[in-house]
Image: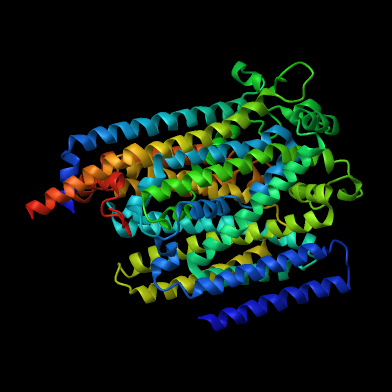
Amino acid sequence: MEHIYRAIRRDPRFLELERRRSRLSWILAAVVIAHCLWYIFAIAFFPEARFAALWGKPLAPGMATTWGIVIGFLQIVLFIVLVVFYIHRANGAFDSRKDAIVADATRAAGVND
Amino acid sequence: MKKPLLAAALLIGTGASLGVRARTTGDTDGVNVNAIGMFFVFVLTSLCITYWAAGRVKSSSDFYVAGGRIGGFRNGLAITGDWCSSAALMGIAGLVYTNGFDGLIYSVLPFGAWPLMMFLLADRLRNLGKFTIADVVSLRMARVPIRSLIASAGLAFVVGYLIVQMVGAGTLISNLFGLKYEYAQIAIGLLIIVYVAFGGMIATTYVQLVKAVLLLSGTSFIAFAVLAKFDFAPESLYAAAVANHSAAEKLMQPGGLLHDPVDAISCGVMLLFGGAALPHVLMRFFTVPDAKEARRSAAWAASFIGYFYLLSFFIGYGAVVFVMKGPQFLDADGIIKGGENMAAIHLAAAMGGDLLLGFISAVAFATIVAVVAGLTIAGASAISHDLYANVLRHGRASDAEVMKISRYAAIALGILGIVLGIAFKEENIAYLIVLPFTISATVFFPVLFLTLYWRRLTTTGIVAGGWLGLAAAVAMLVAGPTIWRDILGHEAPIFPYKYPALFSMTISVVTMILVSLLDKSARGHREVRAFEDQFVRSQTGLGAEGATRH
């Protein structure tokens, strides 16, 4: 198995695929962490901080619904969308490229043996 | 295999009916016939599932991970079942009922753990692991110290989570079914032993599936009933809630629950990173055939769980409108009967009368039983697979032997649950949920994350950081306001914050990094070099356990 791993590691297509996939996961993870931090800091520093004050404001004067409720709700919706988007990319284009790389490396190893 | 199962089922049935009869001949207040009927339907269904599954558990792989044959959609539902404990149904509604907006932190932040788990952990874990998360780490690390650490932390996690669920279930059942608290503990404990010891992961998965469907439909029904009263205009619901609650417009603003910024941040860190590495949830990524299905099941689970959390934006506020001023739900002092955790249950009665109340009570019971079953199998695998087979027997134990130990472990954990459930009766158990989540954020998340992403990590680093972080977390919890001041009765807490995760996680991560960098041993050097192969396997699934599609 080790020499197949080595072959895959040297395959420039694998490096390229890995770079793209990890870039996507890290960007998406950063978006999620930023949202969670916004939520945490809004609760921690309400009402003094300006980025937190919005969370307690009504959507319109006289309304009971606050921006905090709407933002929290939309954050959950956003997280679902991001997960579905990621799985679409990972199980689609990324996985078929990965399968091709693995198949080539396994075949090459078989010839060498 | 099947005879003791039937005997146990009979025992539970008679035990439960004895308890109910004892109570109905005396004080009949609070006995709900619908609830008892639906409760028995669920118990019977789950026992049939276990009977069916028991014939299919033939190897340790069947026992721990259902042979790795669960499809993405079904596994997604089962994960939903594992994730949504009674805390998610009753706890969030209760927190919003009392504290307003801040209660929703328990919806948004734990859910933020989902995309993180998905982008950073799920498929890589599937490619590297076999039965437990310790398998993933010990692939390039030293087996004995790693498994000792992860299994010990895992058992502390399981026991802490177990107490919360057992006490919650006991209170719920004695409130609703009129069954004595102790009988309720014994009935739940025996049920769990039957599910796990006989049916293993196969039975646990299908019980979890049934429960997830019940929970999602019951919760949807309450939320839609609440919204229907306001012509599906959330603004009218929130306006009515604001008018009904003493906090008035503060009900819709942050700041009702977490007053201290450090506590708020630490609580957020705990929910986000702790939630991303719950061992009994991560274990579910090993029950699917490959990384593709692992991702697919994570996506299904995220959709169901997200939908469930969206409903929590209406249920807690619905309780403020319909329960807070309903005389039948309040005691003589105007306090909600059974405590704030009963808000969602009372709301069900307000929306759909006795029938819906019975249904939701049975759902809450099913929820707790299924979560305890998931925890028990995680605990049993830590004991038998990690500690017994790999630490004590150095991987030389036979499959049959390991299965036997798993069954004993499940029975022992079930009995431990009964004993602890009875011991912690009447205790305020809400703080105990902090222990498992803090352990998860302090030990499991850093260890898994650094193993997958940081080449220089070594066993010595993990062991030093993991044990130190674990000790710090427990010490800070005990010395904190909840235990030191409120429970032990000391004047002032030694450690000022209720949530230690921010500090304990920092301690464990920094120690892991520093000690790994200082580790110049030959073993450490080998482990750093082994990162390359682990990396390729984590990305491609080549060489993964039970991978059939490559």
Above or below, B514 against A46 in this view is below
Occupied quadrant, residue B497: top right
Left or right, B327 with reference to B359: right
Q: Residue at x 65, y 45 (%)?
A: B482
Horizontal and vertical percent position of residue B382: 44, 62
Q: Residue at x 53, y 37 (%)?
A: A80
Horizontal and vertical percent position of residue A69: 67, 29
Horizontal and vertical percent position of residue B59: 39, 71
Residue sitting nearer the eye, B366 or B478: B366
Instruction: Work out whether residue B277 can be spotted.
Output: no
Q: Residue at x 36, y 53 (%)?
A: B290
Left or right, B146 with reference to B473: left
Residue sitting nearer the eye, B21 or B209: B209
Above or below, B159 against B304 in this view is below
Above or below, A28 against B323 in this view is above
Residue sitting nearer the eye, B91 or B53: B53
Q: Residue at x 77, y 30 (%)?
A: B238
- Which residue reaches farthest left? A112
Above or below, B64 against B128 in this view is below
Horizontal and vertical percent position of residue B199: 51, 70
Residue sitting nearer the eye, B125 or B301: B301
Specify how the rendered protein is coloured.
rainbow
> How many numbered marks have been drawn onto this rendered protein structure?
0
Left or right, B530 with reference to A56: left
Occupied quadrant, residue A53: top right
Instruction: Work out whether residue A113 can be spotted.
Output: yes
